[in-house]
Amino acid sequence: QVSVINTVDTSHEDMIHDAQMDYYGTRLATCSSDRSVKIFDVRNGGQILIADLRGHEGPVWQVAWAHPMYGNILASCSYDRKVIIWKEENGTWEKTYEYTGHDSSVNSVCWAPHDYGLILACGSSDGAISLLSYTGDGQWEVKKISNAHTIGCNAVSWAPAVVPGSLIEQPSGQKPNYIKRFASGGCDNLVKIWKEEDGQWKEEQKLEAHSDWVRDVAWAPSIGLPTSTIASCSQDGRVFIWTCDDASGSSWSPKLLHKFNDVVWHVSWSITANILAVSGGDNKVTLWKESVDGLWACISDVNKGQGGVSAVTEGQQNEQ
Amino acid sequence: DTVPPQVVPGADPSARQLCFAWGPAEVLVCETLFGRAGESRSRAGTAARALTGSVAGAGEGAPSSSRVYVVRRDQDIYIQTLRKLFNESHAIFMGLQRSEEELAGKSRKAQLVQVSKNYRSVIRACMEDMHQAAVSTRDPALQGQYSTQVSILSAMELIWNLCEILFVEAATAGPLLLRLLDWVRLHVCDVDSMVREVLSSESPSKHKLFWNVVDVFVLQGRMDEARHLLSKEASANPTSMNMYKILDDLMKKMPVPSLGNTQTLTELELKWQHWHEECQRYLQDGTFASNPHMESICKILLGDEDAILEKKELMTTWYHFLVTRLLYSHPTVKPMELRFYAQSSMDLFLGGESSPEPLDMILMAAFEFEMHQVIKECSIVLSNWWFVAHLTDLLDHCKLLQSHNLYFGSNMREFLLLEYASGLFSHHSLWQLGVDYFDHCPEYGRVYLELHIERIPLSTERKALKVLRICEQRQMHEQVRSICKIMAMKALRNNRLGSALSWSIRAKDAAFATLISDRFLKDYCERGCFSDLDLIDNLGPSMLLSDRLTFLGKYREFHRLYGEKRFPEAARLLLTLMTAHIAPCSFWMTLLTDALPLLEQKEVIFSAEQTYELMRCLEDLTAGNPDKQKFQDDDVETTKVEMLRLALARNLARVIVKEGTMEGS
């Protein structure tokens, strides 16, 4: 069973497009078509409005919390083509940086693993992906990948930080040799994987399987296995799970999770990557889990599902 | 047919879609309508929606819901009265993990059975607490909740007990029946109040429920108690004395399995056969014909299914019926034969009137020795993982799971433990128990711990230290560093520079240490004194973490030396700070200004060479300074420079004289 433990009345004057908990589940950030971003303290079932952030001039599509080691930082992106980074200083939330380098709506923002520093990836309807890196002293460096997806980019999601090769503790002050990667989904029906090489971002892989716009991508957290997993969902109603077995990241194979009857808008992984949440146009949120035999089972009714009960493969229903 | 979705109260599925986000423990659900403005491919009306800011929805222009629901999956860990269950079972679990694996055979089995009993007594203790809570509360809603919990706990204990008998103890034919009888007696309690009522009445044999109670005793194999009651009836009704004596004798003589090895199964079966035949003869002779109650008892003794089934209400459950049947028709039943009797018992008892409930299916699976089925069904029915995780772990220790040829195998244990422990992490104090469980999951325990422990809110320094200790003990260096950085950032935001510095040293975060050192130095420049002297004075080797930190430490040392009037040492240090480039250029002016009092001392402190060095530093500073313009414009700065030049020149003069006239200082 699930129970609603708190109903936060955000008083947004228009549709809410995104709601995200911070790292510890103590704060909630919401953003809306009413152009505002709001932050609430939700500890112990309460809801105290901490900040009502104005700065966008259009509907705000997504918010993303940075890792707490950088302080209290929130990023937001909007139809107004802007990405704004907000920071809490001395108890108040203020705009700390505004990026206006996109020509069209910015649809998605995602913070990189904290190991890489403070880096934000932004995907826009102008087809470009920009990467904003904090270099210190209030300065941000921008790298842009133009024409990442034709027509537009709808989603970006970072791969978890994995140090290649040895796992010995690095001497202090020295940064390990991370290979930075992220995935993006676009209106060209593609999921793309980008890799940083010599300070430049290059397209590493093109994953083709969808027949319509890719709406969301989500790279699963790592549980120590050498495999990488990405979930993607699309206007075509399909959700694919992509896996790559080798560490070099060269061969990705898709598995169809399910074909829904309507557009699928969001996919997201739980912290330990064992459950995938899918939000669809069919007005439901379904939760999926992979059983040991590799089949994906829908467990959206918690009463009936946990433990790999009925496996649902494409076209089939409850099969024991 | 698909699995029904969760229903979020208040959300209107017809007009909205649901947006979903994972929190570390809870999940967020809010109503939204997907679709980006300005896209020609999106739903009709989206563009209009974005521009006007209102929602088309079902065409009513209804205001959008501005509510975000915070939803939680496992509420059980927040129930106060269950706290004991989680804490004490954790202790039993840990004891089991560390227990002697070298013990073999009987002693190991006895040990495992004891563990099982311990778990059960914890469940019972919890049930008792819950029952007390239910009785003492005035709030009907709470009372309902507690009562539900009591029934759930009771069911759990029922299942666990059966599993203990069949799997852990693996009772063999003979003792098996005795254990099952105990099990039934312990768990079928609906008749207890009736029994009490009759026994405590003045004249039990006259009580209208007298025979019911006798029947209960017979059905549960409680022969002595049945005979005792019957004797009261006999003394009240002398006419049935004869009948009574015979029945009493039969009941007394009934052969039952014994726990000691006093007889073999074959001997028992033989005796039982004889006894059975004797009962048969008496029944057929019509001995009990005039007393239907006694006759029915005799039939029960003969294992007559119909006679037993007539007493359905006294047995209340099909598994009671099963055990009674076995007692009176096949007391030497073997474990593997149970499944047949179980299935037919359930069918006969339910008789097509009602269908089996989840609990029935679980028990049936146990009688069929389908351990995996038991676990699977329990996982589905119960709202949290506590039960299946601990039971499976115990069964795994009994080496029972590995013999099953299913893909889950021993991974089932870890899978369930991971789920259970993950659930604990959302609780502000139970998470500590979760750590131990993860420790005992060899495959994924560590990585799950790494992912979860990062999400524990570090609300107090004490909590942070607790989490750190756990990470350090397990060499989780990344997490240690991450936590220290978070604490350093928090301290810095709250202007607690000393705390921030010690955290960043612990995190070995050079960049942050530099940042904080700069803040300290800035503070010094503004206020003329240092804060957190203790910390800076005792930096030790960690001073080397960053150049700026080293400078801070050394600079403070300079001040200390000066305060202790150890001027030559102070002077030497001051100079080294500049010449060895430990001090940042921006600070040189301050250092040179610090040199002034040393230059003005009565005694000459700086040697000639040192003075030349100082002069050079000053010239370097003023000459190569890009802010030369600023220097020249700023009166204060120019005055300072002038003063320094004068002081240096004077010192030089004095020292030349001194060094010239003395033979060596």
Image (spheres, coloured by chain):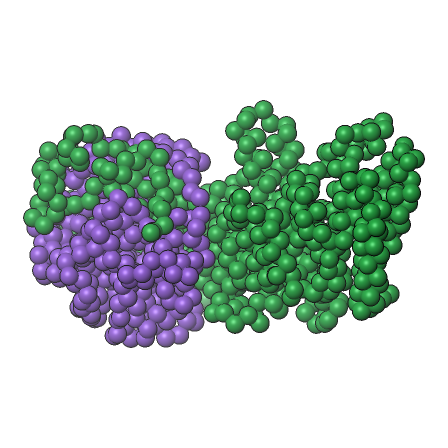
Chain colours: A purple, B green
Please tell me which residue is depicted at 59% across the width and 57% down the height of the picture.
B343
Indicate left or right for B384 with A67 as reference. Answer: right
Front-lying residue, A28 or B408 = B408
Front residue of B357/A51: it is B357
Height in image: B413 above or below A56? Answer: below
What residue sits 63% from the left and 28% below the top? B136
Identified at 57% across, 62% down, the residue is B371
Task: Give coordinates of residue B614: x percent, y percent.
Answer: 31, 59
Say if B428 sits above or below A157 in the image. Answer: above
| Front one among B207 and B632 | B207
Res. B219 visible in picture:
yes
Quadrant of the image occupied by residue B113 = bottom right
Does residue B274 appear to the left or right of A50 in the view shown? right
Q: Position of residue A315 (x, y in %)?
A: 28, 61
Quarter of the view holding residue B479: bottom left
Q: Would residue A102 be found to the left or right of residue B110 on screen?
A: left
Q: Give residue B431's position: percent from left, percent from top.
A: 52, 49
Q: Quadrant of residue B245?
A: top right
